[in-house]
Amino acid sequence: MQKMIAALTLILAVLAVATRVVAMRRKGVKAMHLGELDKTDFLIPPFALFYFYLVFADAFGWPAVSLQVFFCSEIASWVGAAVGLAGILLLLSTLVFFGTSFRVGIDTGNSDKLVTTGVFALSRNPIYVAFAWVLLGQFLVFPNWILLVYAVAGVLLFHRQVVREEAFLKTRYGEEYLEYCGRVRRYL
């Protein structure tokens, strides 16, 4: 059951983001800016597809890439499923509070308002916290070395993107953003 829940969290994460991107496009807002400032961002989708295969292969009994596991714990697996679902709930909450300010990548062409309420009053980057929770949950459900590498690499890539976004937000919003940084933590 935990494996199915973990696979479902990936599907829900992709559907949530894709639905928001499509809904914004219908309102005339281009939300997808992946790779516009850094062309290496286009390396992310193939690695993401491989990650999806790893999770679905284990969940549905497809041919496995690696059978090595770090531990086998029913409790850790249930904790992982719960952490992944918490990540999805945080992701959905983030998308709601983002409103029309949501973007995938950095949008240098539009000037939306700085979002500082809701989950953004607790974390300046709740969407990345949500994705990190999903990755951690996945690893606890499927505790193999490849998913551990993905979780570590994912967190490092999220941090890299946060640093890039913060530099942009400082120039875009100036003192308003600096004041926000002074009262709300980067992550948690």
Image (spheres, grey):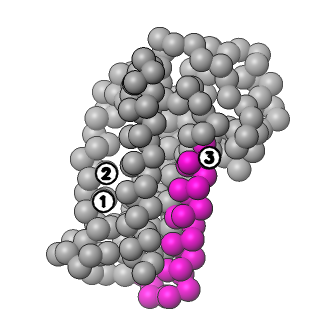
Q: Quadrant of the N terminus?
A: bottom left
Task: Please name whichever residue, 186 or 117, is drawn nearer the observer in this view of the structure.
Answer: 117
Looking at the picture, how far across and down is residue 184, in whole percent?
77, 38
Whether residue 132 is situated above or below residue 24 in the rendered picture: below
- The amino acid pointed to by label 2 is Ala
* Spatial CA span between label 2 and label 1: 6 Å
* Spatial CA span between label 2 and label 3: 23 Å
Q: To which residue does mark 2 refer?
A: 48
- The amino acid pointed to by label 1 is Phe
Q: Is residue 78 magenta?
A: yes
State the extent of the magenta-drawn residues as a range: 70-94
Q: Are marks 3 and 1 in contact (CB under 8 Å)?
A: no
Q: Is residue 111 left or right of residue 42?
A: right
Q: Is residue 49 left or right of residue 32?
A: left
Q: Residue at x 37, y 81 (%)?
A: 69
Q: To which residue does mark 1 refer?
A: 52
Q: Does the magenta stretch include residue 60?
A: no
Name which quarter of the figure residue 171 lies in. Answer: top right
Whether residue 128 is situated above or below residue 67 in the rendered picture: above
Whether residue 74 is situated above or below residue 150 in the rendered picture: below
The disc placed on residue 93 is: 3
